Amino acid sequence: MFVQSQQLVEINGRIHNVNASKTRIPYFSFQIEGKPGTFYNPGNGSLSLFKTRIIDAGQPISFKIRKADLPKINADNRLLYFAYNGHDLWIDLYYSIVRPDFITQFGYLTYFFLLGVANLICIYRHRQTRLFTKLFMGSGIFFFMMMLL
């Protein structure tokens, strides 16, 4: 995430048009004055509920895009934006890197849940071993992080 954050370029402008999605986790796409492209960031997870909402057109904004997308800005493309008005950069970067499909995510959740159950059994049977306790805590953290996707 840190490496990808270093490859972002800031864009400033004024919002021309805003479109809100009608999905469970809302996201906004917008256009800025003087640029034909549409900027969007769907998020895809429950962390997106904490992101700043785009209220109305006509307000000045700043956001970031990838350096590779900079030549596409003057074409009529859909471009992924990051850090609307400087907020929520790490949430946007997290979802731009980690976007597994449902089957893969369900497989990982099942794996970490079963790993946690196996470690609980080992903790119960071998109380003097701290290794299983640490493995259980680690699998619990991974299980929680996968649920955030």
Image (cartoon, rainbow, N blue to C red):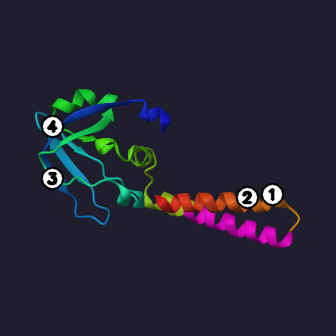
- Reading the image, the residue beneath label 4 is 76
| Contact flag, marks 4 and 2 (Cβ < 8 Å) | no
Residue 135 numbered tag: 2
Query: Residue 112 at x, y = what percent?
Result: 62, 62
Q: Residue drawn 78% across and 61% down?
A: 132
Query: Callout 3: helix, strand or loop?
Result: loop
Tell which circle, 3 or 2, labels the residue nearer the N-terminal end.
3
Q: Which residue is mark 1?
A: 131
Q: Are marks 3 and 1 in contact (CB under 8 Å)?
A: no
Circle 1 SS class: helix
Q: Nearer the viewer, residue 86 or 2?
A: 86
Q: Which residues are magenta?
A: 109-126
**Callout 2: SS:** helix
Q: Earlier in the sequence, mark 3 or mark 1?
A: 3
Q: Amino acid at mark 3?
A: Asp
Residue 8, image quadrant: top left
**Where 26 sits versus 12, above or below?**
below
The amino acid at mark 4 is Asp
Query: CA separation, marks 3 and 2?
Result: 48 Å
